[in-house]
């Protein structure tokens, strides 16, 4: 066992003390992964198989065998178990042992030990956090284990930024706040373009309502007149969607980064004791998830409500007004519920981001009133 890192050196020696040849075909089991529906973190589990060409990440669903493996690993949300040998590992197995459990193991080629001879095998094992510098210190070839999904490249950049900000302020919560501000200003041009497009569409809403009344029995004519209206006022009906679509990869990448960031585990900020769990201001005598009072998601929902109040243009018809009222309350409630049980670090990011958007909208509203 290493005194300086999370590595273990495993030496296996087999000596044939008999008078006849001994056939050895032993498996080396790395561990078992269970995918219980009761375990909320089971979705973060996967198996990583390192080959000469690439590292494959899979969530076990059936029995699988891989030949020519450089290393084998299994991981959960924050931690990983990795094993590699002195030479290329003959085969890696994923074996289903129950409806929800899979065994991850290695299997060597059958070897024959003559009488009086011995066999020596050596393995390097890592049992520790999914932290790039820590894993690199043991074996740089294992670094590909750390993977954040489809937008892994963006996630890795965001994680490096988060670590950089932490080195400046020495607090992970404050580092998330700075990262939120940095990402907000990075995407600010796209945000402004999206808000202007939405504002232009809202300004045309009364005209669109009139067209709907005028051509309610002629959908083709209605569509044609609407497109003419957009062309006349130089408004792109999809202008508000494109900037949002361009932002989505960053949002998804940041979500994965903050959800799996082991640095946040046990890190405190203000009243938050652990940024990897809900902020839990105090306990409440209710069933889950409302057995604790989480302040951040509630503040975020209130901010969304105020934000929608500022961006909603008065409706010209009763049906539209009713829809606006429903959306005004439903959207903040829905997002508040979704984020209520999420890690405080992730909610903190969204809260800071939405607060900055709200401040910008208030400033723009005051500027428009002045003009």
Image: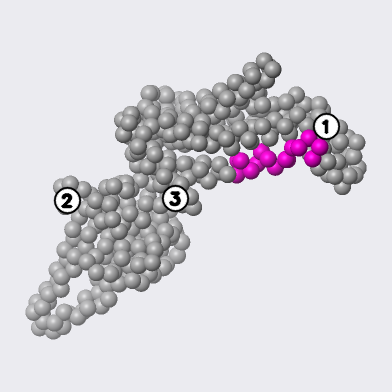
Asked if residue 204 lies left or right of residue 285, the reply is right
What residue is shown with label 3?
A: 153
Q: Residue at 61% of width from left, 41% of height from top? A: 243
Element under label 2?
A: loop
Label annotation for residue 2: 2
Q: How far across and down, in percent of the image, does residue 282 sit?
A: 42, 24
Q: Earlier in the sequence, mark 1 or mark 2?
A: 2
- Residue 272 drawn above or below residue 221: above
> In the depicted view, which residue is nearer to us: 72 or 12?
72
Query: Which residues make up the magenta segment?
Result: 231-245
Q: Mark 1 and mark 2: span between their CA atoms?
A: 73 Å
> Residue 310: within the magenta?
no
For label 3, the crowd category at 10 Å Cα-Cα, with few meaning under 14, some 14 to 19 and many 20 or more, is few
> Which numbered disc, 3 or 1, marks the residue that appears first in the sequence?
3
Could you tell me which secondary element the residue under label 3 belongs to? helix
Question: Horizontal and vertical percent for residue 117?
Answer: 10, 78
Q: Are marks 3 and 1 in contact (CB under 8 Å)?
A: no
Asked whether the residues under the numbered discs 2 and 3 touch, taking CB atoms below 8 Å apart as contact, a structural biologist would say: no
Residue 93 appears in the rendering: no
Q: Quadrant of the C terminus?
A: top right
Residue at 30% of width from left, 59% of height from top? Answer: 141
């Amino acid at each position: 066992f290493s005194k300086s890192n999370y590595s273990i050196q495993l030496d296996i020696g087999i000596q044939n003390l008999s008078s006849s040849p001994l056939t050895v075909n032993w498996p080396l089991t790395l561990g078992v992964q269970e995918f219980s529906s009761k375990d909320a973190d089971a979705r973060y589990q996967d198996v990583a198989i390192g080959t000469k060409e690439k590292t494959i990440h899979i969530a076990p669903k059936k029995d699988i065998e891989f030949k020519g493996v450089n290393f084998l690993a299994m991981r959960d949300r924050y931690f990983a178990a990795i094993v590699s040998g002195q030479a290329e590992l003959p085969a890696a197995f994923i074996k289903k042992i129950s409806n929800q459990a899979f065994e991850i193991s290695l299997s060597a080629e059958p070897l024959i030990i003559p009488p009086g001879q011995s066999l020596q095998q050596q393995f390097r094992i890592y049992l520790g956090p999914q932290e790039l510098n820590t894993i690199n210190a043991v074996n740089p070839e294992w670094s590909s284990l750390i993977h954040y999904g489809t937008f892994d490249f963006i996630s890795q950049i965001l994680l490096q930024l988060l670590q950089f900000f932490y080195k400046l302020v020495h607090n992970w919560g404050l580092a998330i706040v700075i990262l939120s501000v940095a990402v907000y200003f990075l995407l600010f041009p796209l945000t402004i373009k999206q808000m202007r497009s939405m504002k232009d569409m809202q300004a045309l809403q009364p005209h669109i309502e009139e067209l709907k009344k005028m051509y309610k029995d002629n959908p083709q004519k209605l569509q044609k007149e609407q497109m003419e209206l957009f062309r006349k006022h130089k408004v792109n009906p999809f202008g508000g969607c494109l900037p949002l679509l361009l932002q989505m990869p960053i949002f998804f990448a940041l979500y994965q980064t903050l959800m799996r960031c082991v640095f946040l585990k046990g890190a405190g900020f203000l009243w938050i004791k652990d940024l990897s769990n809900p902020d839990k201001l105090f306990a409440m005598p209710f069933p889950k998830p409302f057995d604790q009072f989480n302040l951040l998601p509630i503040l975020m929902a209130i901010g969304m409500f105020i934000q929608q109040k500022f961006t909603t243009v008065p409706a010209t018809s009763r049906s539209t007004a009713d829809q606006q009222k429903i959306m005004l309350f439903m959207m903040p409630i829905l997002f508040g519920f979704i984020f209520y049980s999420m890690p405080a670090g992730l909610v903190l990011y969204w809260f800071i981001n939405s607060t900055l958007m709200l401040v910008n909208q208030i400033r723009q509203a005051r500027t428009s009133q002045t003009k």
